[in-house]
Image: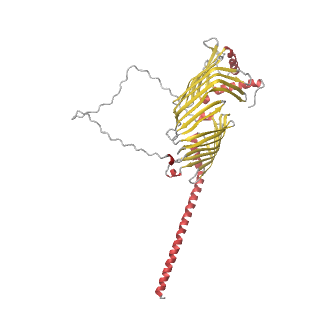
């Protein structure tokens, strides 16, 4: 073999080796780039977790919660899973005598929407929570303080008011016909195509194992345990449900989303010995979230015994019925419109611990209307032979209330109420007036009026023969303490 041919073979061999080395280097470079990207992603993820759990980030989050609930929150830790849930652990706040404790709150956003700058909530799940609602705190903190302004009445004018007419268009000097302004054609409205329901993902609000307590200050009113819910709020038609335990019984309610509104199928139940029916629907997909609620107590008999420490009585009625309907927007109280009617016949309330006295009413009636954020009660009455109670009043959307209650008794029952008044001095009466009740137009009837004014949670009351206002809460406490002293003197006082 010649020297030229040998050099040619060596060059070809060198080219083959360099090509093979370059082909081996390509996947190596891709693997190295992929490893760098993974390390970079893990580093960013770790830094984000650290930042989310700093005091600065938690303060931002708790300030947001505070603005929504008017309460100071504490957050234990924040964890997010890429393209998954954002999880807040150990949330806690106090609200008066109650508060809220949440073991875990998981929020699933639309990650595709986040890339385009919009936040859409796909699912929110609350797991293991204790919600203790204090009605007194809610009244004090969540009601606004806007004043009730009554516009002055305008005097009616007998003269017709002159109507202002628009000026006539100027006429052209060269033509007797008036010059008509040119009008540009309006653009045709663009109709957006609505996506089909089958293409929309469902959005959910979920609750797992929640305990709910309703209280008024230190007094616990009701408790609901083991509440779970799965409620759809958007997307294609789908069913959800709510279940809970109340008074030792398990209850469940089916809810449905039809693509436009959320509704609960008409349900029936029993509470305090009364059968009832109710139905609710809310169009969460529309502006303002319009809703409709109906609650009906069909005509029936009532016989219920209330047994609590130092409060034992029975209430019975031959006939009782009620109807409550309300519609409006969840986001605007002024849009609410509703009616309330409740009636009963032959109602008897009997005290079962000490005196065993009873109050009998031939009939009771309650009529109310809701409009422009105001609840008006023009008629509230309980009419009996010995005792009659007449009342009316209003409650505004900022919980400011006012009304009057007239108490009428015959001469037989007068002595009992006078005894209670002199034993408690629960309400102020002018010194020149010694008695609680005063003669009415008829000789066998006595009466007094109580005027009420102020916020619902802190009403003030005064007697019609006095100009001194006093706290209704303190009046009730005086009466309650007087009852307990009477029970203690007879050895009947029970431990709470």
* Spot occupied by residue 253 in the image (x, y as percentages of width and height): 61, 39
**Please, which residue is most extreme toward the left here?**
174
Q: Which residue, as the protein is rendered here, is positioned at the far top? A: 443
Residue 132 x %, y %? 65, 38
Which of 238/189 is in front?
Answer: 238
Question: Residue visible at 37% across and 22% down?
Answer: 160
Q: Is residue 396 above or below residue 99?
A: above
Q: Position of residue 39 (x, y in %)?
A: 57, 61
Residue 123 in the image: x percent, y percent? 57, 47
Residue 96's image quarter? top right
- Is residue 63 or residue 202 the one in the foreground? 202
Residue 430 is at least partly visible in this image: no
Between 120 and 70, the residue placed more toward the observer is 120
Residue visible at 75% across and 31% down in the picture: 495
Q: Residue furthest bottom?
A: 2
Q: Quadrant of the C terminus?
A: top right
Q: For residue 250, what is the image quadrant? A: top right
Residue 477 visible here: yes
Q: Residue at x 71, y 29 (%)?
A: 307
Residue 238, compared with residue 360, is above or below; it is: below
Q: Nearer the viewer, residue 52 or 24?
A: 24
């Amino acid at each position: 073999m010649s020297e030229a041919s040998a050099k040619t073979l060596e060059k070809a061999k060198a080219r083959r080796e360099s090509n093979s080395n370059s082909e081996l280097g390509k996947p190596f470079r891709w693997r190295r780039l992929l490893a760098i990207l993974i390390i970079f992603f893990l580093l960013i993820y770790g830094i984000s977790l650290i930042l989310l759990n700093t005091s600065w980030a938690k303060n931002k989050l708790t300030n947001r919660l505070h603005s929504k609930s008017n309460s100071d929150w504490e957050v234990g830790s924040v964890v997010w899973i890429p393209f998954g849930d954002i999880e807040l652990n150990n949330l806690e706040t106090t609200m008066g005598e109650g508060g809220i404790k949440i073991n875990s709150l998981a929020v699933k956003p639309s990650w595709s929407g986040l890339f385009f700058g919009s936040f859409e909530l796909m699912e929110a799940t609350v797991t293991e929570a204790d919600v203790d609602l204090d009605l007194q705190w809610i009244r004090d903190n969540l009601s606004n303080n806007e004043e009730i302004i009554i516009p002055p009445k305008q005097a009616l004018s007998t003269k017709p008011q002159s109507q202002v007419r628009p000026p006539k268009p100027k006429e052209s000097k060269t033509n007797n016909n008036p010059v008509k302004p040119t009008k540009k054609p309006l653009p045709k409205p663009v109709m957006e195509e609505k996506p089909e329901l089958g293409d929309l993902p469902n959005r959910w609000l979920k609750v797992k194992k929640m305990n709910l307590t309703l209280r008024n200050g230190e007094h616990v009113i009701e408790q609901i345990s083991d509440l779970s819910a799965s409620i759809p709020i958007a997307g294609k038609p789908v069913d959800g449900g709510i279940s809970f335990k109340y008074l030792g019984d398990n209850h469940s309610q089916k809810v449905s989303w039809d693509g436009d509104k959320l509704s609960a199928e008409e349900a029936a139940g029993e509470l305090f010995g009364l059968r009832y029916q109710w139905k609710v629907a809310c169009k969460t997909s529309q502006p303002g979230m319009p809703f409709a609620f109906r609650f009906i107590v069909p005509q029936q008999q009532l016989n219920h015994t209330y047994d609590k420490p130092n409060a034992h009585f029975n209430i019975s009625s031959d006939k009782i019925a009620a109807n409550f309907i309300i519609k409006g927007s969840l986001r605007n109280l002024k849009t609410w419109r509703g009616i309330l009617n409740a009636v009963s016949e032959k109602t008897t309330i009997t005290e079962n611990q000490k005196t065993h006295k009873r109050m009998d009413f031939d009939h009771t009636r309650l009529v109310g209307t809701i409009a422009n954020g105001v609840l008006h009660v023009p008629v509230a009455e309980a009419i009996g032979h010995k005792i009659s109670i007449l009342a009316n009043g209003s409650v505004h959307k900022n919980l400011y209330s006012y009304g009057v209650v007239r108490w009428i008794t015959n001469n037989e029952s007068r002595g009992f109420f006078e005894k209670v008044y002199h034993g408690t001095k629960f309400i102020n009466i002018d010194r020149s007036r010694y008695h609680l009740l005063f003669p009415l137009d008829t000789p066998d009837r006595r009466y007094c009026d109580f005027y009420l004014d102020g916020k619902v949670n802190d009403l003030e009351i005064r007697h019609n023969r006095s100009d001194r206002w006093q706290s209704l809460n303190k009046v009730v406490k005086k009466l309650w303490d007087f009852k307990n002293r009477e029970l203690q003197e007879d050895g009947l006082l029970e431990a709470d």
